[in-house]
Image (cartoon, rainbow, N blue to C red):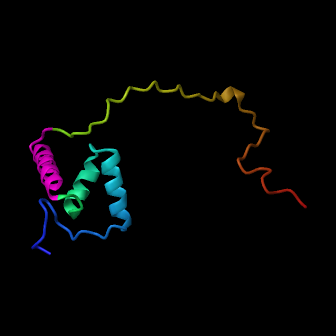
Amino acid sequence: MTDNLKPGQKFPTPTPGFGDRVFYETLLRQRPDSIMAQEWCVSYGVLPHDEAERLHKKVTDRKRQMRLGGGSAATSPARKTSVKAKKRVIKEERFEPDLQVSGGDGIGTAVL
């Protein structure tokens, strides 16, 4: 296996009909900027040698930058602060001692 490895390849190349290979190759074709697809295709050597070399350089540069604390390449947008809903306070004045309330009353108690 070590004789025919492409740049960045770590694992044996799966067969063309293998489900993961189909998924990641399609993802890379549809979204060439997909980090997940780039790394998988490079690691499994499914790309032509020239493209594998180019993507391997891109992937290693990205990983090196991540280790150096350059931040993430795909950051999520800042979250907006949400307005908290006011909690209802049950006043004791409304409590009626004669009334018994239970969450399970009346459920499944009907006689057929």
Residue at 16% from the left image edge and 66% from the top image edge: 10
Image spot of residue 49 (x, y percent):
15, 58
Q: In which quarter of the image is residue 39?
A: bottom left
Left or right: where 87 falls relative to 12? right
Is 100 located above or below residue 25 in the figure? above
Residue, x 74% and y 43% (percent of image)?
101
Q: Position of residue 97 (x, y in %)?
A: 75, 37
Foreground of the two, 4 or 94: 4
Work out which quarter of the rendered image holds the C terminus and state it.
bottom right
Residue 36 relative to residue 84: left or right: left
Image quadrant in which the N terminus is located: bottom left
Relative vertical location of residue 51 with respect to residue 94 in this rendering, above or below: below
| Magenta segment | 49-70
Along the line of sight, which residue is nearer the eye, 64 or 46? 46
Query: Toward the viewer: 15 or 35?
Result: 15
What residue sits 28% from the left and 52% below the top? 37
Query: On the picture, is 93 further left or further right than 56?
Result: right
**Numbered disc total:** 0
Magenta stretch, overall SS: helix
Let me know if residue 53 is in the magenta part.
yes
* Farthest right residue in view: 112
Please report the residue visible at 26 percent of the width from the left and 43 percent of the height from the top. Answer: 33
Name the spot of residue 99 as percent of width and height, x first: 78, 39
> Where does residue 64 sit, x and y in percent of width and height?
10, 47
Q: Does the magenta stretch include residue 109?
A: no
